[in-house]
Image: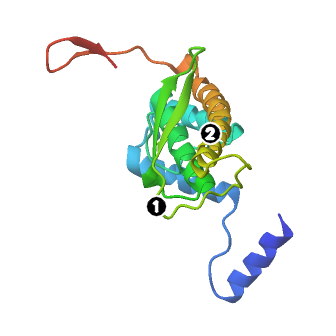
Amino acid sequence: MDPNDKLKQAANYARQMSALPSPEDEEKLRDKIARDFFGEKGIPPELKQGWAVLEQLRKEREKVNYPLPPGGCLLLGRESVLAGCMAELHTALANMLHMSVDCIRLRLEKDDFGKIRPAADVEPPDDWVIPVAKNVNESPAAAAQRYLQQCLNAGSKWFAAAVSERLDGCESRRTDLEQPGIPWRSENGQEQTT
């Protein structure tokens, strides 16, 4: 037993509180709670499998520094990864440009090489101070445009790397736990698969 646990047990005993539960006691308590909730059969195997998939996804997402939010039930796909990266880029651009997020509109567009990149429409406020020095023969508008482009280029590099890493983390699947899709009919009568 850890010496710190002994100290905590002694302190609890002095305060007339219960001792710290041992790992075996905690496991018995978890088992009792599961049996009270699910009945004598305990936790259903499907729930255990789902939990194993969630834990694996949580570990994969932590490896790429994109952790799952605590609790809740999430459907994670390509769209949610892109949307999360766009939101982070939007906030980062607002910080780099020293302006409100309301002044920046982000969109995705294809570049000349066919790759998808973020593009921004920026409407600086009237009191915006350009955070860079302008060159000798450069107008303030040109200096502002140059700075905007530099910030967007830096954000685009981060965006490409983050989306790639996070999609790799989301693509890690337990194929042994996959279940067949169940067909169902939508409101317009077309057969869909979940």
Could you tell me if residue 11 is visible in this image? yes
Q: Position of residue 17 (x, y in %)?
A: 62, 82
Residue at 65%, 36% in the rendered image: 153
Neighbour class for label 1 at 10 Å: few (<14), some, many (≥20)? few
User: Of callouts 2 and 1, which one flags the residue occurring earlier in the amino acid sequence?
Assistant: 1
Residue contact between numbered discs 2 and 1, judged by CB atoms under 8 Å: no
Can you say whether 127 is above or below 96 in the image?
below
Q: Is 173 on the left or on the right of 2, as rendered?
A: left
In this figure, which residue is indicated by the disc labeled 2? 149
**C-alpha distance separating marks 2 and 1:** 19 Å
Residue at 67%, 41% in the rendered image: 150
Q: Position of residue 54 (x, y in %)?
A: 55, 36
Report the quarter where the C terminus lies.
top left
Can you say whether 59 is above or below 95 in the image?
above
Q: Is 133 on the left or on the right of 129, as rendered?
A: right
**What label sits on residue 126 in the rendered view?**
1
Q: Nearer the viewer, residue 61 or 32?
A: 61
Q: Is 171 on the left or on the right of 34, as rendered?
A: right
Kind of residue at badge 2: Gln
Residue lying furthest front in this view? 137
Q: Position of residue 23 (x, y in %)?
A: 69, 56
Q: Position of residue 51 (x, y in %)?
A: 53, 37
